[in-house]
Amino acid sequence: MPEVVNQVKEITGVKFEVGKGEVRKGEYGAVYADIGKVKKVLGWQPEKTIKDSVEALVKWYEKRPERWKS
């Protein structure tokens, strides 16, 4: 997750604190993603980077300024 947060900070230029709250009932305490197995078994490679995805999301929100309300 730090990769996503760091990309958001870099792309938007917005500085913000990140903290970890309590795990809510029914939530996983931690989630990890690793594409190593799919690369090995299927030979699959992602076409987009985390940066590409964050940039696309920021552009989507920029077209919809009402969505930026906190």
Image (spheres, rainbow, N blue to C red):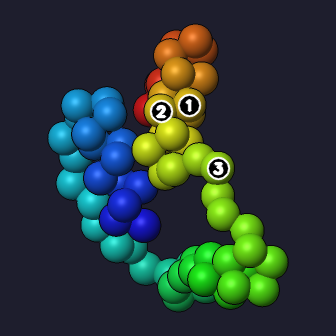
Q: Is residue 35 above or below residue 41?
A: above
Residue underneath mark 1? 56
Decide: marks 2, 1 in contact (CB < 8 A)?
A: yes
State how far apart marks 2 and 3 are (Cα): 14 Å
The label nearer to you, 1 versus 3, is: 3
Q: Is residue 9 left or right of residue 45?
A: left
Residue 43: image location, x then y, percent: 74, 74
The label nearer to you, 2 versus 3, is: 3
Determine which quarter of the picture holds residue 41: bottom right
Pick whichever, 63 or 50, lies toward us.
50
Decide: marks 1, 3 in contact (CB < 8 A)?
A: no
Q: Of the residues shown, which amino acid type is indicated by label 3?
A: Glu
Q: Residue furthest right?
A: 42
Q: Of the residues shown, which amino acid type is indicated by label 2?
A: Glu
Q: What secondary structure is marked by label 1? A: helix
The quarter of the rendered structure image containing the N terminus is bottom left
Q: Is residue 59 left or right of residue 37?
A: left
Q: Of the residues shown, which amino acid type is indicated by label 1?
A: Ala
Q: Residue at x 51, y 39 (%)?
A: 52
Determine which quarter of the picture holds residue 42: bottom right
Q: What secondary structure is marked by label 2? A: helix
Residue 29: image location, x then y, percent: 53, 87
Would you say residue 44 is visible in this rendering? yes
Residue 54: image location, x then y, percent: 49, 40
Residue underneath mark 2? 55
Residue 31: image location, x then y, percent: 56, 81
Crowding around mark 3 (Cα neighbors within 10 Å: few <14, some 14 to 19, many 20+) is few
Residue underneath mark 3? 47
Crowding around mark 2 (Cα neighbors within 10 Å: few <14, some 14 to 19, many 20+) is some
State how far apart marks 1 and 3 are (Cα): 14 Å
